Amino acid sequence: MRPFIGTFAILFVMSVCGCKKNDPPKKADLRPRLEAAMQITNSNDRDSALKTVAVDSAGLGAGDITLEALAHMFNSSFRDETASDCASRLAKAQQLSFAKDVAKTIVSSNLRDETLKKLAEGV
């Protein structure tokens, strides 16, 4: 009977209060998020968290945070893919100079050239 009451209570609270929607990222939150991500000791988890920060900051046009997040990533192929994505997002956010700087950090020459070509073509 107790599990039923607990489940009922949770469902009741959720129906009355609703579920919290994911708020879009805020520029002011980026630096603390970056600092938190950099403190993660497991390299895969850190890279994953840094990717999220990099992508969010690129979408908001914060190229400085994007570059810093990318610089702290360990896995180079994961970083390159993230950098390519971020360069596109920065370009869409009207931050072409940062987009170019991010694209130039890509180690893979094929992906770097492909990304730079997209930036040059305005894609």
Image (cartoon, rainbow, N blue to C red):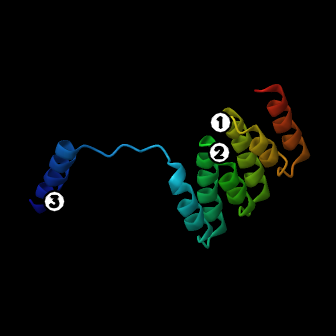
For the residues carrying marks 3 and 1, which lies nearer the camera in this image?
A: 1
Residue 10: x and y in percent read 19, 53
Q: Which residue is mark 2?
A: 58
Q: Which residue is mark 1?
A: 93
Residue 33: x and y in percent read 54, 60
Is tag 1's residue or tag 2's residue first in the polypeptide sequence? 2
Direction from residue 70 to residue 38 in the image, left or right:
left
Residue 37: x and y in percent read 58, 64
Residue at image point 69% right, 34% down: 94
For the residues carrying marks 3 and 2, which lies nearer the camera in this image?
A: 2
Distance of mark 3 from mark 1, alpha carbons? 49 Å
Q: Secondary structure at mark 1?
A: loop
Q: Residue 89 appears in which quarter of the rendering?
A: top right
Direction from residue 102 to residue 8 in the image, left or right:
left
Q: Residue 39 appears in which quarter of the rendering?
A: bottom right
Is tag 3's residue or tag 1's residue first in the polypeptide sequence? 3
In the picture, the disc for residue 3 is 3
Rate crowding at label 3 as few (under 14), some (14 to 19) or many (20 or more) other CA atoms within 10 Å: few
Residue 24: x and y in percent read 47, 43
Residue at image point 84% right, 42% down: 111
Residue at image point 69% right, 40% down: 90
Is tag 3's residue or tag 2's residue first in the polypeptide sequence? 3
Q: Tell whether label 2 touches label 1 (CB within 8 Å).
A: yes
On the rendered image, what quadrant is the C terminus found in? top right
Rate crowding at label 1 as few (under 14), some (14 to 19) or many (20 or more) other CA atoms within 10 Å: some
Amino acid on which disc 1 is placed:
Ala
Rate crowding at label 2 as few (under 14), some (14 to 19) or many (20 or more) other CA atoms within 10 Å: many
